[in-house]
């Protein structure tokens, strides 16, 4: 069984960081987002929302998912985090060079509510009782060796203090996830076949709540169950939630034992050194992202507000920084790099309404 990471094979990870990822399924990289992106992308947040930052009565949604207007290569947005991501994945050659290789301003905001802000901390919902634990996947048939969401990332664009809506991580939940996937070699199609993937979390014991400073990045194994959390402070907690996709499925039977940290986490939680017998029994399938539709539906309204704000400053549409105003080629590139040229799964359709984050 894989108990410890191989020593000396990482260029950007300290051995202690590799050990932490293997043990806990996540890693925090402090102060790694380049300040220019925080400043520029957050500068028109409230314009895009149409909310007044000084009047919380205008905050009409507890959670709010925003669409992209800009995207920049991941290694430019948070270079130190990217270096550690490369080591965790086993080298940049294993990472898909296109899909989700860009980080954007598709913010997820947890506003909380006045009611929660007035509640007694002793009444906070216990972490294991929080609803909504899941592993991110709305676009592919999921097998034990699937690497299409190899890593789930949390980019923090605001501070996240205690009780401030930080994502809940279930560290000992990985074991139940990988065992469930091992027992289902036919694979699981989102969303309905994934509903039982994290039901075991209610019996888990090891939970961590994300607490962060603006500029921090959290790197989560793609099979680490996590959930949104309540924001009891009633402020705008702003994150993005991109992913890292690999070129090929995980290899859980490497004769030379040269497993990536991602593969080691799976093997460790199954108590195995290798899994030569595992073979998917259905074909791999990939679809249009089911949850992006309701975000794209917000583009038109955001653009109207951005253009109006520019006009109020004596500027025009050409001064608005949005990929949707850069011509058809920019829009097509965005679609290509975010899986929006894939077919829709007609059996499940698209998710057209806001969901918690």
Image (cartoon, grey):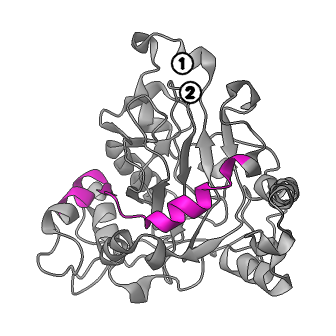
Nearest the eye: 227 or 346 = 227
Quarter of the image holding residue 303? Answer: bottom right
Tell me where the magenta segment starts and ends, as one range. 19-46
In this image, 65 relative to 28: left or right? right
Q: How far across and down, in percent of the image, does residue 345 sit?
A: 79, 64
User: Can residue 329 be seen in this snapshot?
Assistant: yes
Q: How far across and down, in percent of the image, does residue 105 sit?
A: 62, 61
Which label sits on residue 236?
Answer: none
Relative to residue 82, is residue 156 depicted above or below? above
Name the residue at 56% across, 18% down. Answer: 116
Relative to residue 192, is residue 119 depicted above or below? above
Q: According to the image, label 2 marks what residue?
A: 234
Q: How far across and down, in percent of the image, does residue 108 sit?
A: 61, 48
The answer to whether the residues at label 1 and label 2 have Cβ atoms under 8 Å apart is yes
* Image quadrant containing the C terminus: top right
Name the residue at 70% across, 53% down. Answer: 66
Residue 8 sits inside the magenta stretch: no
Nearest the eye: 332 or 287 = 332
Kindly state the secondary structure of the residue where label 1 is placed.
Answer: helix
């Amino acid at each position: 069984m894989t108990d410890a990471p191989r020593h000396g094979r990482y260029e950007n990870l300290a051995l202690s960081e590799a050990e932490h990822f293997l043990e806990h399924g996540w890693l925090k990289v402090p102060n790694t987002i380049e300040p220019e992106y925080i400043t520029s992308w957050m500068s028109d947040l409230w314009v895009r929302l149409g909310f007044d930052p000084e009047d919380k009565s205008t905050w009409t949604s507890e959670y709010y998912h925003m669409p992209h207007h800009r995207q920049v290569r991941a290694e430019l947005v948070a270079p130190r985090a990217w270096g550690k991501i490369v080591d965790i994945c086993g080298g940049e050659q294993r990472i898909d060079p296109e899909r989700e290789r860009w980080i954007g301003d598709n913010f997820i905001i947890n506003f909380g509510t006045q009611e929660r802000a007035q509640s007694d901390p002793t009444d906070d919902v216990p972490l294991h009782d929080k609803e909504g634990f899941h592993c991110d996947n709305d676009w592919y048939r999921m097998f034990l060796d699937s690497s299409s969401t190899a890593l789930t990332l949390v980019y923090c664009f605001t501070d996240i203090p205690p009780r401030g809506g930080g994502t809940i991580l279930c560290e000992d939940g990985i074991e139940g996830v990988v065992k469930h996937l091992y027992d289902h070699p036919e694979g699981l199609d989102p969303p309905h076949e994934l509903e039982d993937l994290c039901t075991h979390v209610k019996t888990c014991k090891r939970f961590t709540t994300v607490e962060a400073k603006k500029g921090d990045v959290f790197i989560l194994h793609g099979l680490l169950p996590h959930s949104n959390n309540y924001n009891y402070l009633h402020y705008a907690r702003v994150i993005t939630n991109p992913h890292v996709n690999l070129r090929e499925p995980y290899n859980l039977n490497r004769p030379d034992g040269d497993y990536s940290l991602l593969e080691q986490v799976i093997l460790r939680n199954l108590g195995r050194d290798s899994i030569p017998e595992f073979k998917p029994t259905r074909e791999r399938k990939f679809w249009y992202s089911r949850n992006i539709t309701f975000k794209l539906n917000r583009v038109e309204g955001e653009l109207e507000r951005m253009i109006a704000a520019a006009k109020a400053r004596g500027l025009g549409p050409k001064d608005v920084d949005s990929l949707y105003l850069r011509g058809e080629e920019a829009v097509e590139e965005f679609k290509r790099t975010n899986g929006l040229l894939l077919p829709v799964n007609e059996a499940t359709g698209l998710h057209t309404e806001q969901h918690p984050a």
